Image (cartoon, helix red, strand yellow):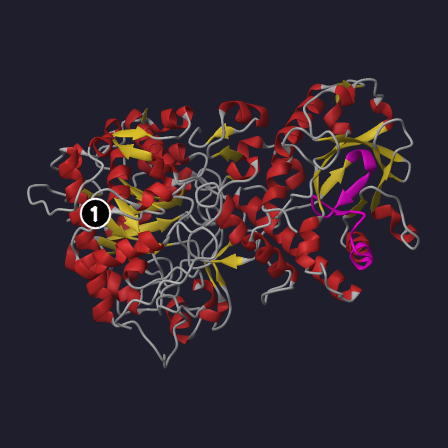
Amino acid sequence: MLASFWTERRIRHLKEMSGAAGKSPGEPMIASMGSTGPPNVEEPVFIRDYLVSDGAQVTRPSIDPYREPVETEVFLNGLGIRLSQPLILSIYPEYPSVVRRAVVRVAYNLGLLAYISGGGLASGEEAYAERILVDDDSHGFTAVRHHDRILLKTASTIGLEWTSGLSWRNIVGVVVDEDHTGSDTPIEIATSHVDRILRKTSLDGQPLRDQITLIVSSRSIRGADDIFKLIALGADAVALGDAALIAADCVGKTLPEELVYERIENLVLALQKEVKLLAGAAGVSSLFTSLVGNRELLRAVGLDAETRERLGVKLAGVG
Amino acid sequence: MHEYLPIPPAHGVEFWNHERIEHIRTLARFGRPAWVWDRAKHTSRRILDRIRFRAELESPEQEPYEVDDVDPSTTLAYGQIDMSTPLYLGDMSFGALSGIPNIALAKTADLTGILTGTGEGGLYEKVRRYRRITVQWASARFGVDLDVLNTGIGVVIKIGQGAKPGIGGHLPGVKVTRPISETRRIPIGLDAISPAPHHDIYSIEDLGQRIMAIKEATGKPVFVKVGVTNYIGYIASGIARMGADGIIMDGQGAGTGAAPEVVRDNVGLPIEIAVPVVDKVLRREGVRDGFSVIAAGRVSSAEDTAKLLALGADCVSIGTAALIGMGCIMVHKCHLGFCPAVITNKIEEKPTRILALETATDWTVNLVRGWTAELKAIMDTLGVRSLDQLISRRDLLVADSIPADLAEVMGVGLC
């Protein structure tokens, strides 16, 4: 049973991009006539449903995402890893093994990371280890590990407990996981909060944020719009899981691994193109240098003043 | 096609729901007012639907009636264009629409004394002989030459549109048939994707040069069309200062023949926020008088029109509503080329079904007349006799269940 935010519209969009439906796998979904999306038509579910992105016009030009380069690579500083786009593919314990294998291979081949949530490497996955994050509880706190580098894993919260007693010297990143026990704050607010804290804190005279990678993870990430907005709120990369599972249309079906692989690969390529469309429209030529934490590109159509303040996002209509 | 199709059930929620479609059809059939206060707004989430005229709160039950002694006429572009009513039939291209609808729109504009825009695809030969059209100068310059620019009553420089601000026009390859190929001078069967920006407009000064060049070449008024985005106030102010005669602002949610869904659903702001913000900026800067503010995007009724005028617009643009008047049933298939209402289908050399031009024109003319009659009834109820008594009258409005700070940005008082 899927959560209610997986609307028919969202599922169709993902399946068309993966090739499980429609005729243009690997491409952004084209639609016509006016939007039926939130917040003005469909009822908003998440804070990000109230946020819109900018379109660059006249006073600064947009960038043509079909003809001009829009750089989607992001650098995970602490890990020394370059992602081809700000996307991490999560694998949850209950996922069918064909999906797990396909995701690991797609992440490896397309320059992403796979994140095995709630587990470690399985046999046969060592060859892909350089592009895999695993959970690791052997450090006295909940951690995510890449080889010998450690990222702090925290619930989606604005409590500060997670920073106390830590030695940042041993930590290369933070993973804010909305599905982690103790999450009590929407992922948008937690993302913005952690980004700001890291920007305010220094280590060796340098802002901690420059040395620490911020990854946010939620099973509720539905597509490129969610990814784009969370990057603008401060994340370096966004981890999604169920969107890929839904896009592959493999739940309750027995599909060959190659077909699942192809669909997830199509999805990843299409998400990259959609992120490029949003970036190009906003006049952003490089996600890593111009989008990460750039809240000015967003406006809130609605939301109360306190929530906007926590996000650092202005009200629609405010220049 | 001479009859409306049955309206199918919508997939999920829809702004253009059955009540709105039925109301537009009633206007298009009879050309008479069908209601005074918009009854579809009560089930709608849109911000504009949560702003009410104070007069409605005093007399919510109003039967439709005809009014004689109210004048809905206006002028645009520093008095250069007379309009019988503040309605502009939106810029929809030959290609996005299948030809007959383009002619019906142009014919309606001539018959009713309003305006229509030809959209981006160059000038369709059968539209050329109508007088009350604007021709569009967009980023791909499809079919644009001096002769075309001189054809209409004015020129629209298209910078952006509400369904995809920052992204160029998109005509899917399946719709690029021989007639489109000839009008746009592009290969058959290939997607026509216009550049996202104009590559000769990288600043407000660049835009100023294009405005002046077109004015010098044609002597006609120039409008600049933009999508509503974060800095719409500054953009409008720049456009006015650079000598344009008006701005067409297209809000988030506006229709499109084809757009990436992720952009359509996530980029840009609603028109009802832009209009008062822009009106205030232009007044503060002393560039409001005579400059035309045309508001577009989800304009669905005369009440929407009156509210957008009271918020600070001079005129509204109607696109989707005009198509519904011609029989659109809102199945969102325009980009696929097989429109059941034969409005946005691909243009074939031997079509099996076509829209009947006479019927489509009658429906659209009636829609303009019925819409105007409802606008006059609203003006009468508000106690205003002409549009200059309605435009920028934010005091006539009151915010109903919208956040106080948003109401303040819009210049509208609270309930």
Q: Compared with residue A156, is residue B35 higher up or lower down, i.e. above or below?
A: below
State yes or no: residue A84 in magenta. yes
Q: Residue at x 41, y 24 (%)?
A: B405
x%, y% of residue B117?
29, 55
In what element is the residue under mark 1?
loop
The segment highlighted magenta reads A77-101
Foreground residue, A142 or A276?
Answer: A142
Foreground of the two, A153 or A74: A153
Left or right of A244: which side holds B2? left
- Around disc 1, counting alpha carbons within 10 Å, would you say few (fewer than 14), some (14 to 19), or many (20 or more)? many
Q: Quadrant of the C terminus of chain A?
A: top left
Q: Which residue is mark 1?
A: B35
Q: Is residue A33 above or below residue B243?
A: below
Spot occupied by residue B113 in the image (x, y as percentages of width and height): 16, 54
Q: Quadrant of residue B332?
A: bottom left
Q: Is residue B165 left or right of residue A286?
A: left
Q: Label 1 is placed on what type of residue?
A: Trp
Where's residue B299, x and y in %? Answer: 32, 47
User: Chain ID for label 1?
Assistant: B
